[in-house]
Amino acid sequence: MFHRIAAFASCWLLAGFSVAEDWPQWRGVNRDAVLSDERIPASIAEGTVTLQWRTAIGPGYSGPTVADRYVYVTDRGPNDAKTEIERVLCLDAQGGDLVWKHEYPAPYSIGYRAGPRASVTVHEGAAYSIGAMGHFVCLDAATGAVRWNRDLNEQYAIDMPIWGITASPLVYRDLVIQIVGGRDAACVVAFDRASGQERWRALGDRAGYSSPILMQQGGQDVVVCWTGDSVSGLDPMTGKVFWRVAMKPRNMPIGVPTPVVQGDKLFVSSFYDGSLLIQIDPNRPAAKQVWRRIGIDEKNTDALHCMISTPLIKGNHIYGTDSYGELRCLKLENGDRVWEDLTVVPRNRWATIHTFQIGDREILFNDQGELIFGRLSPEGFEVASRSTLLDRTTKQLNRRGGVTWAHPAIANGIIYARNDNEIVAASLMESAAR
């Protein structure tokens, strides 16, 4: 089962997620990439993972989601498409066959044009998808029928981020909360799940690229939004700002990773702007900065300057991927570096590692398409197995032989991952080391 007994659990029970082994939204049930499936092995066979199926899709940066026997993913249309479109695809989780697709025109005025960024959020029979230019649609999860759609760029006059809209929709009760970046204090907007009508808006900040999360403080549900200018805690029902910790960028808004929480600590890390640790009050919705560390620039970093990779807090340490792919361990109390590992992914600008936690061990997926089982500790990263899951492709990044930047999903012991050409599925149990 994927549910955890933790601070987030009651929030997601309120949101209504009930399928324990699914991966129904960005980074799983609790948006923390934590797995509780005890069947997943501690290592798999070295070499290349045996695939259960592979299905051709077009390019895109969005990671797949899995719910009720279906896999959802978005792309820029078939690789031979002559027009600019975005598609939402629903596939059968067992065989990879196409169940339905929804497509619409989507001319881009953004950089990195390989496709949509945000994962589809699936909740109570509805699939919520946001495109790179702000095309927001609610679809019937089983049939693909359109329930409602909104052109957020047209409606809110978005101050469009250079790389477009990337934050995945967050469902809370009868609302779906989205980072919009619109004018007139519409950085964050909550929509009615049934009709798509605006229910509230909040913050005059610029949009960031990070997806919001839910947590609790003193029995109050709080939605945490890392925008282009702050980390803020909002009332998910009204948009009221409970607390706000400024994080002004030195260059441009560039925060991509998801905020991570352990106990009364919340952590974010940015490519140009370094790391910020926040103390969250467990008794009431309040927060304050503990420490902030920034290097000279993105090459000469201090503590941690994450780009795409989301870090994790484990015990009294932070683990994360620095600006050029350096896997680092920091002391939680002050951000001092404990160690650095250069073997997990080749050193490159924006080198990426996505991390899943299973108890006291981890599964890492790097931008070379490798799946690495092991354990992070203050003593270092202990590798149990290393195998290739997916080929690199060049439309996401036409450099260094290509990348696999999209975050995989793990549901029911099966890993689903995509590149610019295909989405694949492989059973981790069947790939276990013998």
Image (cartoon, helix red, strand yellow):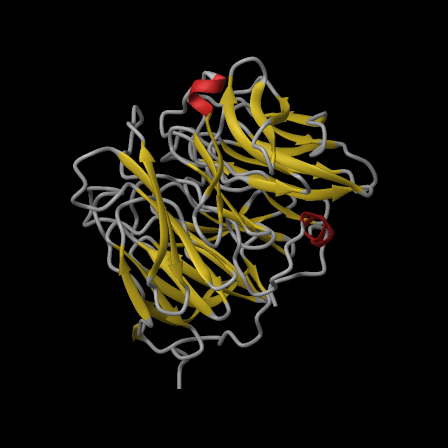
Can residue 166 be seen here? The reply is yes
* Above or below: residue 241 compared with residue 410: above
Q: How many marks?
A: 0
Residue 424 location, quadrant: bottom left
Query: Which image quarter is the N terminus in?
Result: bottom right
Q: Nearer the viewer, residue 16 or 208?
A: 16
Measuring from the top left, give residue 212's x and y in whole percent. 57, 38
Q: Nearer the viewer, residue 213 or 86?
A: 86
Measuring from the top left, give residue 372's x and y in whole percent. 39, 65
Residue 432 location, quadrant: bottom left
Q: Nearer the viewer, residue 219 or 334?
A: 219
Measuring from the top left, give residue 347's x and y in whole percent. 30, 48
Query: Which image quarter is the C terminus in?
Result: bottom left
- Residue 281 is left or right of residue 402, and the answer is right
Measuring from the top left, give residue 364's x and y in whole percent. 43, 60
* Above or below: residue 178 compared with residue 2: above
